[in-house]
Amino acid sequence: MLEELLPNVKWEKVITATNETLYMTGISVIATFILGIILGLLLFLTSKGNIWESKAMNSVIAAIVNIFRSIPFIILIILLIPFTKTIVGTILGANAALPALIIGAAPFYARMVEIALREIDKGVIEAAKSMGATTTTIITKVLLPESMPALVSGITVTAIALVGYTAMAGVIGAGGLGNLAYLEGFQRGNNDVTFIATVLILIIVFILQFIGDIVTSKLDKR
């Protein structure tokens, strides 16, 4: 029955493409979470009235974040081809998509981190300072724990965006469900293949949102 409804779908290719999408999303989400938090913390701490206040440094970091956040992802992939080839050795396959995915998503998430940190009650930070807390202690014991629900909510949104990015990367040879939908589906007129790839992408997005909502609700003590 399934073969009649989906005659062009080769399930071994679907499984491989799904695994590639999950691999690209998983690695890039982890890297984006770490890099985005570092950038977000730097944006927050170097802003006016904060611990490492520095207009020059804040301007440089903000400019880098704004530039990479503003470049359309498909153009970013093309711009990063020489860089990708240097560090990965190829511009094809799931690993080749990772630099563009991370560089494209980290600045986006960094702004979310900065916004989350700005929402923290200044009084909590001042109290920690008055008790002699070091900058490291303030970051690890105050800033990150207090903003964690918003950080998780932000990385959930970013992870969902990354799934979409992997689909775009697939169109230019990165593999995954985007590649399957384009090469095996669209180019060959196999609408059933495109349909299955789309459904699987939607399922991945729904699962990410579900997990993100659960973790956020558990962390939010309000």
Image (tube, rainbow, N blue to C red):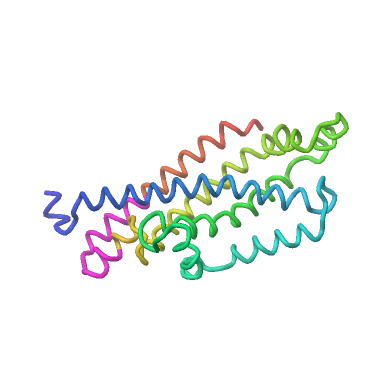
In the image, 112: left or right of 191?
A: right
Q: Quadrant of residue 168?
A: bottom left
In the rendered image, residue 21, in percent from the top left (x then y), is placed at: 37, 51
The structure residue drawn at horizontal position 69% and vertical position 50%, both measured from the top left corner, is 114
Indicate whether residue 201 is drawn in magenta: yes
Choose between 54 and 117: the one closer to the eye.
Answer: 54
Q: Which residue appears farthest toward the right when viewing the image?
A: 130
The structure residue drawn at horizontal position 18% and vertical position 54%, both measured from the top left corner, is 10
In the rendered image, residue 88, in percent from the top left (x then y), is placed at: 43, 57
In the image, 49: left or right of 113?
A: right
Q: Which residue appears farthest toward the top when viewing the image?
A: 131
In the rendered image, residue 9, in percent from the top left (x then y), is placed at: 19, 56
The structure residue drawn at horizontal position 50% and vertical position 40%, both measured from the top left corner, is 212
Q: Quadrant of residue 167?
A: bottom left
Indicate whether residue 14 is drawn in magenta: no
The structure residue drawn at horizontal position 52% and vertical position 68%, both measured from the top left corner, is 72
Q: Reply above or below: 120 against 74.
A: above
Q: The C terminus lies in which quarter of the figure?
A: top right
Magenta stretch: dominant secondary structure: helix
Q: Reply above or below: 218 against 22.
A: above
- Magenta residues, start to end: 182-202
